[in-house]
Amino acid sequence: MKADKVLFITQEITPYVPETQMARMGRKLPQLVQESGRQIRTFMPRWGNINERRNMLHEVIRLSGMNIIIDDTDHTLVIKVASIQQARMQVYFIDNDDYFQNRGMLTDEDGTEYPDNIERAIFYARGVLETVKKLRWIPDIIHCHGWISAVAPLLIKTAYHDEPAFQDTKVVFSVYGETPKNNPAANFRECLKFRNIDDQLLDNTNIDFSSPDALAQLAVTFSDGLIQTEEGVAVETLDFARKIGKPILEYPGEPTSEAYTAFYETL
């Protein structure tokens, strides 16, 4: 398929957060894809350790203000934006006081995973998709990076499938070494339910919703293809993908637009 418009739903981008393999990928890959002549849009959470003043984030009022209901509780969606001038790249940030303000990424300062990480991932994914609808931009490929993006493939293929922006979109999920280590919260499945996502749909998967690997399995199940972004990582996730017949691009080395866009166009 064509891959002229690529949406990146990303967990980390340098320089907004400390540099990691994922943050470097979040910064470099969208730029490479854009420089190859394709259009991009890039999203990440407004993590609590992001300095808004130094990075010149500002709220986009026309995109903000929607309430997203998760487990019967309303959470206000706030959209902010900033630019990486040297890359000529704009980044949209999903923000909410309950889920991101003054909070770290996967864990708190003591290294304890946040008990509502599942809800945070759902809010992030729904926030991105609702914002893309408002932007009236139709992606050919949606490329998800990191555990915080893992709910997006499910939503795109089910609850948002009939939306004009996502009807023909293919979804790619990049697997990394960092994943949640704790078992999901007891309300995991209940929080996922939205529109046509119900017990019957979730029961018809091979996902172990009690496993720490549940988010990765969810992303794999509803993605059209996977990319291994670091050599030797996420072996169990890749084995799960092979078991259910998902196309995989095994670690292709340092990112190039050719390797990634060629994989996009095979889907």
Image: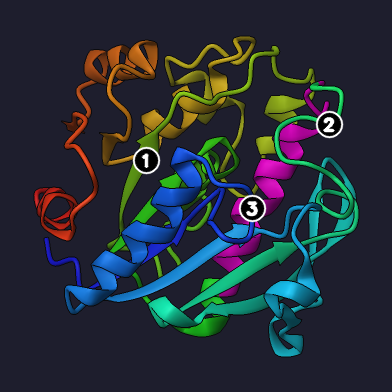
- Residue found at x 52% / y 48%: 155
Comparing marks 2 and 1, which lies closer to the viewer?
2
Question: Along the horizontal axis of the image, is 188 left or right of 114?
Answer: left
Q: Out of 169 and 82, give the one closest to the viewer.
A: 82
SS label for mark 3: loop
* Residue 95 percent across, percent down from the top left: 76, 63
* Residue 240 percent across, percent down from the top left: 33, 14
* Residue 161 percent across, percent down from the top left: 42, 57
Label 2 Cα crowd, 10 Å radius (few <14 / some 14-19 / many 20+) = few
SS label for mark 2: loop
**Which residue is under mark 3?**
17
Gap in Å between the C-alphas at discs 1 and 3? 21 Å
**Which residue is under mark 2?**
108
The answer to whether residue 264 shows anywhere in this view is yes
User: Circles 3 and 2: CB distance less than 8 Å?
Assistant: no
- Residue found at x 43% / y 30%: 176
Amino acid at pointer 2:
Asp
Of the two numbered discs 3 and 2 on the same chain, state the one appearing first in sequence: 3
Amino acid at pointer 3:
Val
Comparing marks 3 and 2, which lies closer to the viewer?
3
Q: Quadrant of residue 7?
A: bottom left
User: Circles 2 and 1: CB distance less than 8 Å?
Assistant: no
**Which residue is under mark 1?**
173
User: What stretch of residues is rendered in magenta?
Assistant: 112-131
Label 1 Cα crowd, 10 Å radius (few <14 / some 14-19 / many 20+) = many
Of the two numbered discs 1 and 3 on the same chain, state the one appearing first in sequence: 3
Quarter of the rendering occupied by the N terminus = bottom left
Q: Quadrant of residue 211?
A: top right
- Residue found at x 23% / y 75%: 35
Q: Quadrant of residue 38?
A: bottom left
Comparing marks 1 and 3, which lies closer to the viewer?
3
